[in-house]
Image: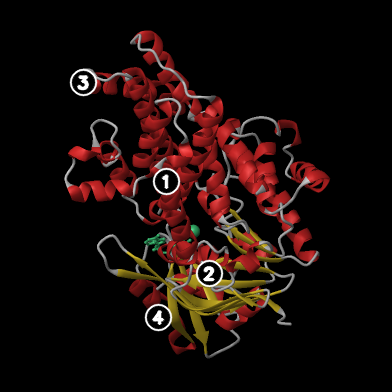
Amino acid sequence: MRVLLTSLRLQFKQSLSRSTYRFVIIIQPILNTILLYFILSNKNFVNVGEYLFVNVSVMNLWSSIVFSSLSDLTREKRMGVLGSNFASPVKFQWIYGGKVIANLILALWSFAVSYLIIQYVFDLNIVLPNVYTLITVYFLLLISFTTLSLFLSYFFLLNRQAIFWINVLEYPIYLLSGIATSIQKLPWFLQIISWLLPTKWIVGLLHQIFNAKYNILTSANVYGLLILTALYGIGIIVMNNIMERKILVEGQLEVY
Amino acid sequence: MNEYMINLDKVSRTYKEKNGTDFVALNQISLNVKKGTIHGLIGPNGAGKSTTMKILSTLLLPSSGTVTMKGIELQSNLNAVRQDINFIYGGERDLYWRLTARENLEYFSALYSLKGVEQKEKIKELLELVQLTDVANKKVETYSKGMKQRLQIARGLLNNPRILLLDEPTIGLDRQSAEEFKNIIRHLAANGTTILFTSHYLEEVEDLSDEITIISRGEIVASGTAQELRSNIGKELYVHAVVENVVNRKQAITLFSRYFGDELSVEKYVERTGNVIEMKVSLSNKKLDDVKLSSFVQNSKIREWKIGSPSLDEIYRYYTTV
Ligand SMILES: Nc1ncnc2c1ncn2[C@@H]1O[C@H](COP(=O)(O)OP(=O)(O)O)[C@@H](O)[C@H]1O
Ligand SMILES: [Mg+2]
């Protein structure tokens, strides 16, 4: 636990001193917001501002997992520090978990950027739900994204091409999460895949809470998200030893 | 308890190459290192030194064989040994460049459960040891190669490791720092730390090691004290000569045997560069007197030569030349 916090602090210091990180945290949300604005602009919504904000925020979160947390593994491998983390007596998940949480906290910045653009550049009003709901949902989101990221990290440590695939899959995943279009319009097998993405449930949940006066305890999205998170969590526990051995067998901790 | 802190028993490691074939980097290596001793591992590039070190550092699992550290079988007890070992690798790695030296040491010491006063003291002590106290609050990216290597050394000592694994640890260090590093290593060994290290610098290996293992193409070709390695080759039976013209193997052998006949026969020819010849010979007449030698030198096209006990350099080349 202490290591988690130490690792979180390290990630803060590291990220904030990296110039490409500014791209992820400021430029990326701006681009995402503009892109989504044009995709959605021909549709008629009542709460278009909120709709846009929710979808962009989830995009930003996904970017933060993909561009920051997972590509950190590749970066640390290149820098030659992955090994000394992995070979320490601490379980690697604590170290990596700290990084993911740090990135998700830093992603709050990107929410703010998107909020400002939508509110003032596009001049669309956003009514925020009450603070307690927001905090609860953010907490849920933190847990589910961290679990997913930990789950995915095994594959990143095992597969040199993982970075390539996650980039290729970025936009399809937005589609599957219901960000640019409604999931109901997708073929049934894609809908089933979308159930495996926490983003699908999060998008649904956020739309509900932004529609005001919504009691999250009655939301199927909350339960969907919790069940999915638990499944990923169990996956991590079950796979942990097997995956760690596999990583050491394949010698994937260093660039060769 | 086992007197060996590190024990490799028929350890092999295979890598998958890009084209899908298997490459055997280590082939049935067996090696023992006693508690509190310094063991040097030398061999040409690609011999498998780093592979051995990575296996012992728990960064890589062997394909077969058994590794035991502090009496614990490593492969199924990785976490039981990690607290007690550490490694220092050459090259600018194992550090966060965007952090300061102090921040690096704070972070890595936390991974070994150091905290509070103990942590502060340890970091202070190590910064002093590697002479980085003055620049401890500067970012590592502003450091020279040597400074980074010194910080790496401090990192590797954070947990007071009982087993220390060093893979070319003096790379990038200037002479003085390398000398200081050797003193640190000697001091650690004297206090019971077991040390296995690789190096490109043979004099460093001879200087530091209680025992030396020579490894070539994934196999151990010789192991023992420097003295033992020497007597294995045979004392007084190593020829080192500088000839006037560049000669090839055949010419060199002919040159020598023409003069000595069957008194001297070449057992293994170890070529060096250009006009330097090295070979292991056997003598039937054990007393080749000086007169005979100097007349040989005058009559032949040999400028200087020496027959005697091989240096570590020569031992090394003897074992690693195929
Ligand atoms: N991850 C890897 N994949 C494929 N081949 C490797 C890998 N690591 C090392 N090798 C090969 O294994 C051999 C031994 O390498 P190494 O242990 O690094 O040697 P040394 O440290 O003695 O120079 C070399 O031929 C090298 O090319
Ligand atoms: Mg090497």
Q: Nearer the viewer, residue B61 or B204?
A: B61
Residue type, label 3: Lys
Which disc number belongs to residue A43? 3
Q: Does dot 1 land on a helix, a strand or a loop?
A: helix
Q: Does A209 sit above or below residue B248?
A: above
A40 to A189, vertically: above or below:
above
Residue indicated by mark 1: A225
Question: Mark 4 or 2 closer to N-term?
Answer: 4
Tell me if I can see residue A72 in this picture.
Answer: no
Sequence-first disc among 1 and 3: 3
Q: For residue A66, what is the image quadrant?
A: top left
Discs 4 and 1 lie in a common subunit: no
* Whether marks 1 and 3 lie on the same chain: yes
Labels 4, 3: front one: 3
Disc 3 within 8 angstroms of ligand 1 (CB): no
Q: Find ligand 1 in the image and state its quadrant.
A: bottom left
Chain letter of mark 4 equals B
Tag 2 subunit? B
Measuring from the top left, give residue A90's x and y in whole percent.
Answer: 62, 56
Mark 3 vs mark 2: give the one in front: 3
Q: State yes or no: discs 4 and 2 in contact (Cβ < 8 Å).
A: no
Specify the label residue B258 is tagged with: 4
Of residues A121 and A28, the one nearer the viewer is: A121
Relative horizontal placement of residue B68, taking residue A137 as reference (left or right) = right
Q: CA distance from mark 3 to mark 2?
A: 77 Å
Give the vertical position of A126 relative to A196 (above or below): above
**Residue B316: numbered disc:** 2
> In the image, residue B70 lies at what x, y percent?
68, 74
- Is disc 1 in contact with disc 2, using a CB cutoff of under 8 Å? no
